[in-house]
Amino acid sequence: MNKLKKNSNLELKDGARIAVLGGGPAGSFFSIFALKLANQIGKDIDLTIYEQKSFLNEGPSSCNMCAGVVSESLVQLLAIEGIILRPPILQRAIDTYCFQTISGDVLLHSISNQSGIATVYRGGGPVCKSTSEKNEKPDSGKISFDDFLIDCAKKEGANVENIRVDKVKLNNEKPEIFSKGEKLFDADLVVGACGINANAVKMFEKLGIGYTSPSVIKAFQSEIHIGERNVSTLFGNAIHIFLINQPDVKFSAITPKGSYVTISMLGKNITKQTVVDFLNNPLVKNKFPDSWRTPDAFCRCVPMINVGAARHPFANRIVMIGDASSARLYKDGIGSAYLTAKAAANTAILYGVSRAAFYKHYYPTCKKINRDNFFGKLMFTLTNTINKTPIIREALLTVLRSEQKQPESDHKCSTVLWDMFTGNERYTDIFIRAFNPRLLLRFLINIFNVIFIWFKNMWRQ
Amino acid sequence: MKNEESSLGRHYKDGSVIFKENSIGKEMYIIISGKVKIIKKKGTVETILAILEEGEFFGEMSLFDNNPRSATVKAIGNTRLLEINQKDFLKRISNDPSLAFRILEKMSQRIRITDGKILNLVLEMKKITKDSHVFT
């Protein structure tokens, strides 16, 4: 252990063996970028992804459980990297966000005027609970985004083993990895891409490297089947955000995908009943077909969401990435996986796998995400306050509606809300733009207008 | 049609002009589906410089040098393109310089192909000059 700590000049040599624990986006991104870069500089590395799950089956057990929204910025970054999302991996391309409040709704259209956000299934799709669902199941078997990324990693030369690594042991020279009590090999680098739902994070906590997993909250994802035609006509290419002040619910969203809509809810003690109550809310029910009734059974899962940063996410020959390290608050988890995986891959290949190398070249990316989340917290608190204050909420809707009516306007307020809910920009940038004096002034004028109209209506009554 | 609805980017019909030579552009494009042809016009003669397919990108030169477009680009068949604007692109590169690796790799490949074409032309011209000397 001491020897590991002292050694600050560890480099991956030809034939180096890398074990990536977890085949979600973080593990696949790391593998793709590490192998690409190693190939570019003529370094021969042997990389194996250990993933117990098959992402090809239906239901939560084969799924990495999230809303499955790939932000516009990540879609573009991946396209530049040569990873292009197309059907059947791409379930629907999104170009609009609909914000539904109890005072009314407003549609925000993509500033880039194109369908830039992707919705995907992480696993093989929802479990079919009825005959109509089974009849509409797509012919193409491979719809999983995670499986698609693993295939991309395989093309770069990654090996994939469908076994679970259940023990990592620090030895004098290299970490040893084990499965079912059997030693697999001594790794030159172990990459922890195991997310936060797995027991694997505990395995790293016990290593004595100072790693502490991030704090988490529970989310609730439900897949509701309404048929492909209904998804197209009623939801189209729009993600619906509901700010309807449901008790204990922080945030609810409906994301259209294939013949289903994904309902994502965030808050305290969310249960199946909370989802049913949400679906029975008149504002939500209004979005569904008249004859539609809330189904008794639907595919659902309760994943954990990273809301804090991990401590010491690296050591000599060990690096934690994705949700097991740092993730953007409430949004763009796949984007955070991309950022941390790429920074870790670049560090490992170009600068080495020592603690010092990770501290200098990898940790700044984590710190940037963590710092940005501070502004994210402020922005979500502000949104919550606005949503709970009728006068300010009305004023916000008025500003947004007037911006959307004028295609030539600067859309300052719309872009703030768009970037915040799509996860397209850093919270720090959004925060700075939200406090633009001209925008604040316009907002203030609209607040006075709303107050004036309220008094006028009261006077008439 | 279903795939059209659920595809990323923007749709261009067969023959539609994505941008014209000498126009000012602040975007680069990645081909999601379909093909495009790169055309250069000299006088009244139009020459197809290249045909690009799915996954390839174009228009990146204007993002770096800020000069007008060097050629015209037209869609071949129904084509979907993902547009990336200059400001977003440069912001992303400043955050992660390694993002430029693939673009530089592609640009290097294109320069190599162009070098090969120039060499062939020079050799051909030399041969023509030599033949004309022999003839005279």
Image (cartoon, helix red, strand yellow):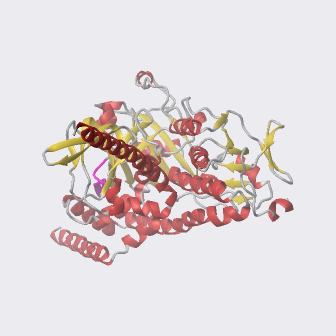
Q: Residue at x 41, y 72 (%)?
A: A432
**Percent from the top left, x then y, of residue B38?**
27, 44
- Is-magenta flag for residue A89? no
Looking at the image, residue A138 sits to the left or right of residue A216; the answer is: left
**Camera-nearest residue between A133 and A331:** A331
**Percent from the top left, x then y, of residue A376?**
48, 65
**Percent from the top left, x then y, of residue B67?**
28, 62
Picture quadrant of residue A28: top right
Quadrant containing the C terminus of chain A in the rendered view: bottom left
Q: Is residue A311 visible?
A: no
Q: What range of the chain is rendered magenta?
A: A102-114
Looking at the image, residue A302 sits to the left or right of residue A5; the answer is: left
In the image, residue A18 above or below residue A297: below
**Camera-nearest residue between A166 and B34:** B34
**Camera-nearest residue between A244 and B86:** B86
**Percent from the top left, x then y, of residue A9?**
75, 62
Looking at the image, residue A375 sits to the left or right of residue A310; the answer is: left
Quadrant containing the N terminus of chain A in the rendered view: bottom right
Q: Residue at x 73, y 44 (%)?
A: A15
Picture quadrant of residue A401: bottom left
**Camera-nearest residue between A430 and B112:** B112
